[in-house]
Image (cartoon, rainbow, N blue to C red):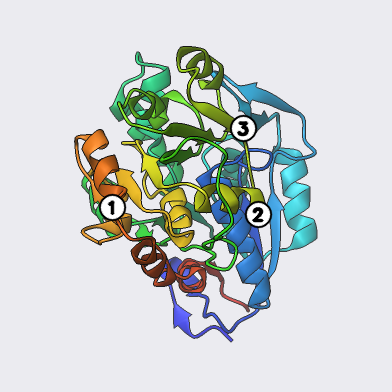
Amino acid sequence: MPVGVGQAGTWVIPESQRLKVLIVTDAWTPQVNGVVRTLEILGRDLSALGHQVHYATPEGRWTVPMPTYSEIRLALFPRGPLEREIREFAPDAIHIATEGTLGLAARAICLKYSIPFTTSFHTRFPDYIRARFPFIGEETVYRFLRWFHRPATAMMVATASLKRELEGKGFRNTRIWSRGVDTEQFRPIAEARLPFAAPIWLNVGRIAVEKNIEAFLKLDLPGTKVLVGDGPARAGLERAYPAAKFLGPLVGEPLARAYAGSDVFVFPSRTDTFGLVILEALACGTPVAAYPVQGPQDVVGESEAAALDEDLAAACRRALLIPREAARDFALAHSWRACTVQFLSNLAVEEEA
């Protein structure tokens, strides 16, 4: 039975209650990024706790490629089919993970039928929009985001610093939902070694302008730069930096071996709100080099597992000296189960009659 009263007549869900949870997301496979991996791991862990999870995704729907980012598919006119999907699944809780066409449809359905729902703020959407469409002002994007998230009983954010920042921009319903790492899948693998000249500097993620990948590729470093992932900037960067190795998207064991077989994980992004790949690299025993910005600072702070510096090349050279055991030990303290329990504590459903 529910044990606590939430906002506006809703019930906060304890971990012990078995729920049917609907997760609505415009970001889904075959995309390989932190949002997709986060939602996949969340679903697996919720299921392990006895909850029933259903994803509403672009899969199986009529879609069009997102302008400037064809890997992301936007569902066309999803509201009618999504409403039927919700009726058939009859969820106890609805979580809207993204602000795309599916997210907008789910929001409209929930408001129409007075269904409480939660949302999450995964990425620095205004920064991404500005990188692709410089003529759109930042405040215009934040106005849309405030409108989108305002009716949610909770908007989940990954870190305390992002929570403070968004509250300063007028968001009032924020809750922390941190990120963890699967330390069984992502682990040190002694025999894993990428077949390139050492030291190996690895980056994993979307190869897109907002990820600042070129700052990594421009660094004057010995050895080999390796990139795992795909995205709209990949073709141009491959032409511009022929010495770098572009391995394409990897998942599962091949991804873990890429992390474990590298010397330093380089994270040049200045816009990520968390950076799940940082924890994945550390879990494989690979130290991290990054800028001292929100995301890396929130994940690793002043720990001995990473080197943060505005001079990214200097951070890389320092990270190369970090013992791999220090990286692994840091990751072991960040389990996914604690994050899943945190997610559950943020959910809300209507009070039963």
Residues 106 and 235: in front is: 235
Tell me if mark 3 has few (under 14), some (14-19) or many (20+) residues whose alpha carbon lies within 10 angstroms of its own.
some
Residue 63 percent across, percent down from the top left: 72, 28
Q: Say which label, 2 or 3, has the lower sequence index.
A: 3
Name the amino acid type tagged 2.
Glu
Depth check, mark 2 against mark 1: the one in front is 1
Residue 253: mark in rendering: 2
**Image quadrant in which the C terminus is located:** bottom right
The residue that appears at 52% across and 80% down in the rendered structure is: 14
Name the amino acid type tagged 1.
Leu
Label 3 – label 1 distance at C-alpha: 28 Å
The residue that appears at 52% across and 67% down in the rendered structure is: 183
Q: Secondary structure at mark 1?
A: loop
Residue that numbered label 3 is attached to: 248
Q: Where, by quadrant of the figure, is residue 57 drawn?
A: top right
Q: Say which label, 3 or 1, has the lower sequence index.
A: 3
Label 2 – label 1 distance at C-alpha: 26 Å
Q: Is residue 33 left or right of residue 159?
A: right
Residue 321: mark in rendering: 1
Depth check, mark 3 against mark 1: the one in front is 1
